[in-house]
Image (spheres, rainbow, N blue to C red):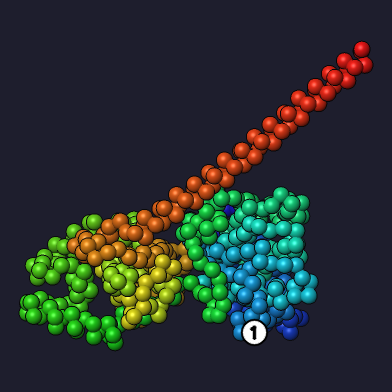
Amino acid sequence: MAEQQPADKAALVSEIRRRFAAEQLPGKSDKYDSRDVERLQQDDLLVENYLIWRHDVVDDTLKMIDESFQWRKQYAVNDLTDSVLPKWLFDTGALYLHGYDKEGYKLFWFRVKCHTKDPKVLSEKKKFVAFWLEHYNRRDHGKPLTVVFDMAETGISQIDLDFVRFIINCFQDYYPNFLTKIVIFEMPWIMNAAFKIVKSWLGPEAVNMLKFTNKNDVQIYINAEYLPPHMGGTDTFKFSYPPLVDDDFQTPLCENGPIASEDENENKEEMEADSKETTDSNEEQSLNPKKISFVEQISKPEENDKTDSKAKNAKKALTTFKGPLLHISPAEELYFGSKETGEKKCLIILTNVTKNIVAFKVRTTAPEKYRVKPSNSSCEPGTSLDIVVSLHGGFLASLHDRFLIMAAEMDQASGAGASELAQFWKEVPRNKVMEHRLRCHVVENSKPSTLTLKENSFIPAKTNEDLHLQLTQLLQVNKRLQEQIDCCIWFQQITVVLALLLVAMAAFSFYLLHTQQS
């Protein structure tokens, strides 16, 4: 299908709204939640997703809207919260949101071995699915996700076709354009017949979304950092409740504001200590707070005269992600120290490679822990801008913490003030926004290695954690090889036994033949 032009898409959106108000709403207003009807009239992206999911066929789109709105009213989806659901649903650990696939889409996990078929609680489990989908939809409106069916160690007691069909229907009929793929991990052979039934429920396009995987190829779709050890990954995450684990990106603390509270006191103490060595350095830091955060990670004897040159050297040394709007350094990881090493601040360098102003926002999965300055601003054409990320108070960085940098090109005449930026982010189309994610790396090296980190400005030496991670991966590879060897030995033993049986049977046959002849 040819891509719709914006004018054509706008016309279809208007037609959907007009026909829905004229044909559906009058006779079924009591079957819809008024909040859903209001969203349909105000949210263009919602209508566009319905149209995409029904290939821009207006009649089919209206039918889907009608069915999904009635379902949402029946399940009271708009009022589903974790507090109204039974706690045992969370305790099973069968369903949860965590991590991202290689394309940056959120992972919705269904650990099948934790699920037991029970018709008495099927209704509550369906609401549980609806809760997770709605929870994510509210937080990252319009962003689809990837479903992972983890079928390791599952058996016949976990086969629940009614529940699986409900999950599929949620994506087919109730949440438009919300699914990217379904990754099925280690499906037991006993379930082949069951999945033939599942495939019959899916259309040709949905069948193409099914990705059957095992340990050897699951990393085609998901990096090891978001895979548990039994899937060949390194992620030790285990879902627990309460509280409700939510690693969606949020706006960090101290957005564009002055660094205050404990961090301010720490900066003052550092400045007072520095003044004992050089008054000039103290005056320079007082005039330029942004430079303080960067200079704190450079050896003090060279602070006064070599700050600018060291900043340039640091920028050159960092790995760089080269996006269409911004070049971002570092490319993948922000290095923070552990409680022992004490490194609490990192630098992100943005370089605008376009001919227009680029607006950017920084969001994090742990907003209570980090302060980002600036977190919502703009970058002039051809210039670079430093973003200081600092840990707040006594918090420590975690390997599960993530940062999201969002960027979009602005019109030169639109202005880049706070009010203009706020309005810009409300109006910018999602497909015009560049996104790049950074993860946190916790350095737990010894004191000499910490000095190496400071002298090289954010470039870490090989840490014990890195070596431990490599050793763990080698052990996992060794384990897989051992399993393959054991399997080969087992087959070899079976082959030898069968060969011996054949020899014995042949000898016995010759013996009988000889006896009969004699």
Amino acid tagged 1: Val
Q: Choose between 97 and 405: the one closer to the eye.
A: 97
Where residue 323 appears, x then y in whole percent? Answer: 36, 57
Q: Which image quadrant for residue 58?
A: bottom right
Q: Residue at x 75, y 55 (%)?
A: 194
Q: Residue at x 54, y 68 (%)?
A: 238
In this orientation, does residue 51 appear? Answer: no
Is 357 above or below relative to 256? above
Please give left or right for residue 332 compared with residue 282 in the image: right
Mark 1 residue element: helix
Q: Which image quadrant for residue 241?
A: bottom right
In this orientation, does residue 346 appear? Answer: yes
Q: Choose between 274 and 37: the one closer to the eye.
A: 274
Q: Residue at x 21, y 69 (%)?
A: 297
Where residue 314 appears, x then y in whole percent? Answer: 21, 60
Where residue 273 appears, x then y in whole percent? Answer: 14, 80
Q: Which image quadrant for residue 135?
A: bottom right
Q: Residue at x 49, y 64 (%)?
A: 236
Q: Which residue is mark 1?
A: 84
Q: Choose between 192 and 425: the one closer to the eye.
A: 192
Please give left or right for residue 130 compared with residue 393 in the image: right
Sort mark 1 into few (<14), some (14-19) or many (20+) by Cα contacts within 10 Å: few
Q: Choose between 317 and 287: the one closer to the eye.
A: 317
Where residue 349 appears, x then y in whole percent? Answer: 28, 64
Is 487 above or below relative to 3? above
Please give left or right for residue 406 compared with residue 36 in the image: left
Is 443 above or below relative to 317? below
